[in-house]
Amino acid sequence: MAYNNGHTNGAGRNGAGGRHSKKRVGVLALQGDFDAHAKAITLAGGDAVEVRTAEQLGAVDGLVIPGGESTAMLKLLNIMNLVEPLAEFARTKPVFGTCAGAILLATEVLNPSQQSFGAMDLTVERNAYGRQIDSRVAMISPGEEFQARAGEGDVEAVFIRAPIIRRTGPGVKVLAEYDGDPVLVEQGRHLVATFHPELTHDARVHRLFLSKI
Ligand code: GLN
């Protein structure tokens, strides 16, 4: 097969079970914490596939853009000629952006302004929690809709030099807030978190994304 299935656990695609019912979820693997996302996708019941080329992108049903450094990721996307294929992908398939991934998916980026895909009608401010206390772990209480779709209870949210969503467009649904700001939002097929659900053992956010594919 043309795609890289290095993160499957063997039980789905090649295992004795026979039917291939798992969703193939690409994880953009140019920079950042893509490996943790691949593990989280596997934990959530998906088939995680590392994506570094347009060909690999063409073989997945949904894509995670991980946290990392959005400027570095943009540079690598340009070098790898992935900007147009990714924009095209987002026009028809679900994308889940966390932290730097959220920044890349927004329509407008502040502090400073930079290129982005505009797949979600959001204005995000980079590194918005300041320099001194720029990372934290917080318990957040998602709204009823999240609880109904993904499971009940609070969510441990790890913020690392996180952006703040300063504006949500009319088509954007806020699923969870922290300190009065949206931190988990969706618009149509896409999902964005400003925190890092891949760094905890709670697979609910990834399962929610899988349910959108
Ligand atoms: N500060 C990073 C950026 O602006 C995002 C941090 C992260 O992804 N954890 O791109």
Image (cartoon, helix red, strand yellow):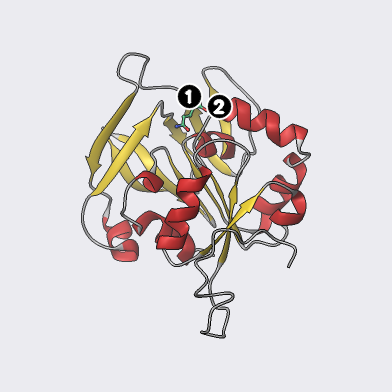
Where residue 35 sits in the image (x, y, percent)? 50, 47
As measured in the structure, the alpha-carbon distance from the residue carrying label 2 to the one carrying label 1 is 7 Å
Residue tagged 2: 109
Where residue 66 sits in the image (x, y, percent)? 52, 42
Apparent side of residue 8 relative to residue 5 in the rendered image (left or right): left
Secondary structure beneath label 2: strand
The residue under the point 73% across, 58% down is 58
Where residue 42 sits in the image (x, y, percent)? 46, 61
Tell me the quarter of the image containing the C terminus.
Answer: bottom right
> Is label 2 in contact with label 1 (beta carbons under 8 Å)?
yes
Disc 1 under 8 Å from ligand 1? The reply is yes
Amino acid at pointer 2: Val
Tell me the quarter of the image containing the N terminus.
Answer: bottom right
| Res. 153 image quadrant | bottom left
For the image, the number of numbered tags is 2
Residue tagged 1: 126
Apparent side of residue 183 relative to residue 111 in the rendered image (left or right): left
The residue under the point 70% across, 61% down is 3
Apparent side of residue 190 relative to residue 130 in the rendered image (left or right): right
